[in-house]
Image: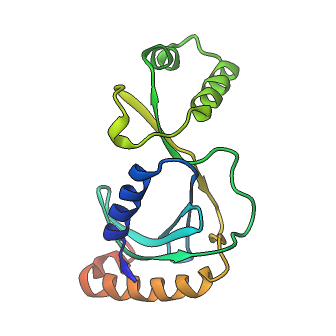
Amino acid sequence: MEPASELKREILREYNRESSEWYVFTSKDIRGHVDTAFVHGKDVWFLKEQPINPYQSVGFGVKSVTGELRGKLPAHSFGFRPLNRRLITEILSEESSARRMDLMVESMLRQRPVPLSRIRSPVAIEGPVVYSPSNLDVFPQQQDLDTKLRTELDRLIMRKYPHLTTTYG
């Protein structure tokens, strides 16, 4: 178990090394903690975090190697995709219909994700991120990890951020 901030740096390093075939899933658990699973090949990083303010969160996570995932992976992998000026202008245009916007999004997602260091355009999209309204269920050992991470995160919050546990926190 490691601080989520350290695992996020590791994930970013790995993404910049190999930017294809990443998948990201997120949800909130019963206490409102944010669960995020990053999947790349057989590697899975599972993070549990609590927002402290709009710019900061605290949490813990683990990296695991799994041979199997539950469910099907999305059609498009996660990543950063630079947008060219023509597409940016078209997106910002008031003349774009809903159908045209769907085609533009599909066109953007068909682009291969690139490492952040290779993005030269003024705008890039990030995603897709699959949000689940119920608990994440991505890999078999996740339930045990979820309990351990929640316990550790709740301890940290009670020790350092007790105001978050009050009615108005």
Q: How was this image coloured?
A: rainbow
Identify the residue at the far left of this view: 160
Relative placement, left or right, of 76 versus 7 is right
For residue 29, what is the image quadrant? bottom right
Q: Quadrant of the C terminus?
A: bottom left
Instruction: Determine the residue positioned at 69% across, 56% down.
Output: 73
Residue 133, by quadrant, is bottom right
* Near-viewer residue (23 or 18): 18
Residue at image position (52%, 15%) is: 90
Judge whether 13 appears above or below 125 on screen: below
> Does residue 47 appear to the left or right of 117 in the view shown?
right
- Horizontal relation, residue 153 to residue 107: left or right: left
Above or below, 113 relative to 27: above
Front-most of residues 137 and 153: 137
Residue 113 picture location, percent across and down: 51, 40
How many tags in the picture? 0
Quadrant of residue 99 in the image? top right
